Amino acid sequence: MEKILEIKNLKKYFYSEGKVIPAVDGIDIDVKKGDIVGIVGESGSGKSVTSLTTMRLIPGDVEDGTILFDNKNILELPEKQMRTIRGNDMAMIFQEPMTSLNPLLTIEDQIGEVSRTHMGFSKKQAKDHSLKLLKLVGIPRPEQVLEEYPHMLSGGMRQRVMISIAMAGNPKLLIADEPTTALDVTIQAQILEQLKNLSIEYDTSILLITHDMGVVAEMCDYVYVMYSGKIVEHTSSINLFSSPKHPYTQGLLKSIPSLDAEQDRLYSIQGKAPNPDEVLEGCPFAPRCEMAMEICSKTSPPLEEIEPGHFTKCWLYSEEEKQKRGVR
Ligand code: SF4
């Protein structure tokens, strides 16, 4: 299937007090048309920097790499052209909708503005389109909500409005950064379901940024697991959940609360993620890894395809290391 987004060897570094912070360090990500692709990791893993860099919302150049969106390298486009792409072909929703909504405008004005600007709709067409979107995202009494202001709505309703705004320009790619984290579990499940329906109805690809493996399981076709600015595992959702390879992914999966298992305490990965400016030799996960070997703290492993379509960055799967340990 054709790719809508192709990130190649992307490096985004920050510089502070003489230190280099490699927030995103040489990652490759593909999103095919119509797919929902997740980037999962703890805070500080580089997943949000990746999404903001893809929208070109972080000032400054990237260190290296290309971001091909619809076959155009968006890193080379003039800002004016990028503004047209944002909100039109590529849209974004954030965790906290209140910071993105204009408190002084009605919901109708805010959704309608996108379809008037980007799709050339008349006021009447924009209103009908807004109404359709509000219904699709499950807003009760949508006619009334169109005339209301953001402060009159609950958090869940505001997030639904944000999704409607993002979808109003009929984007080819929607980037959703922790879109339901601030909401309670029931509302979260409803909104995820509606996002999925919208993606099918409008054939929109979604790049979903989350720390929550439960959200990935619910939504994603493919998953990229990020740790310390790098991709450490990448495969289909089905493979990832049935046969996770990287010890970090295995830890993330063990941390999902289970309703069936008798769990006294929730599992959590020992230690904490390295500071972004910490220079670690070898595998950055080594200080937290229960499987770490001698080589792990000395040399960083490559990202390798260990089964068709399943990539991981861990010495446990290197043929040489397997031979040394007598593993077949
Ligand atoms: Fe653990 Fe070593 Fe694999 Fe890193 S390379 S995840 S330290 S086993």
Image: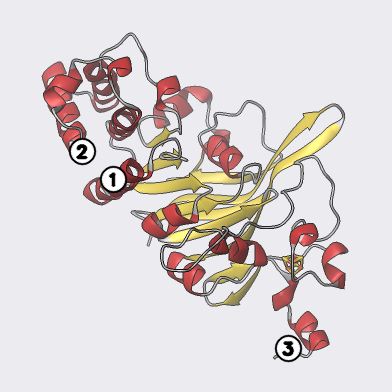
Q: Is residue 294 above or below residue 40?
A: below
Measuring 62% from the left and 62% from the top, which residue is drawn there? 251
Q: How many marks?
A: 3
Q: Circles 1 and 2: CB distance less than 8 Å?
A: yes
Residue 239: where, in percent of width, then height? 48, 72
Q: Is residue 296 visible?
A: yes
Badge 3 density bin: few <14, some 14–19, many ≥20, Cα 10 Å: few
Badge 2 density bin: few <14, some 14–19, many ≥20, Cα 10 Å: some
Residue nearest the viewer, comparing 107 with 122: 107
Q: Is residue 108 above or below residue 227?
A: above
User: What residue did someone put label 2 on?
Assistant: 138
N-term mark: 3 or 2: 2
User: What residue did someone put label 1 on?
Assistant: 190
Is the C-beta of the residue carrying label 2 under 8 Å from the nearest atom of ligand 1? no
Q: Circles 3 and 1: CB distance less than 8 Å?
A: no
For the residues labelled 3 and 1, the Cα–Cα distance comes to: 45 Å
Q: Amino acid at mark 1?
A: Gln
Measuring 85% from the left and 34% from the top, which residue is drawn there? 19
Q: Quadrant of ligand 1?
A: bottom right
N-term mark: 3 or 1: 1
Q: Which mark is residue 327?
A: 3
Residue 172: where, in percent of width, then height? 35, 43
Helix, strand or loop at mark 1: helix
Helix, strand or loop at mark 3: loop
Q: Amino acid at mark 2?
A: Gly
Residue 190: where, in percent of width, then height? 28, 45
Q: Quadrant of residue 224?
A: bottom right
Quadrant in which the N terminus is drawn: bottom left
Q: Amino acid at mark 3?
A: Val
**Closer to the camera: disc 3 or disc 1?**
1
Q: Is 110 on the left-hand or right-hand side of 46?
A: left
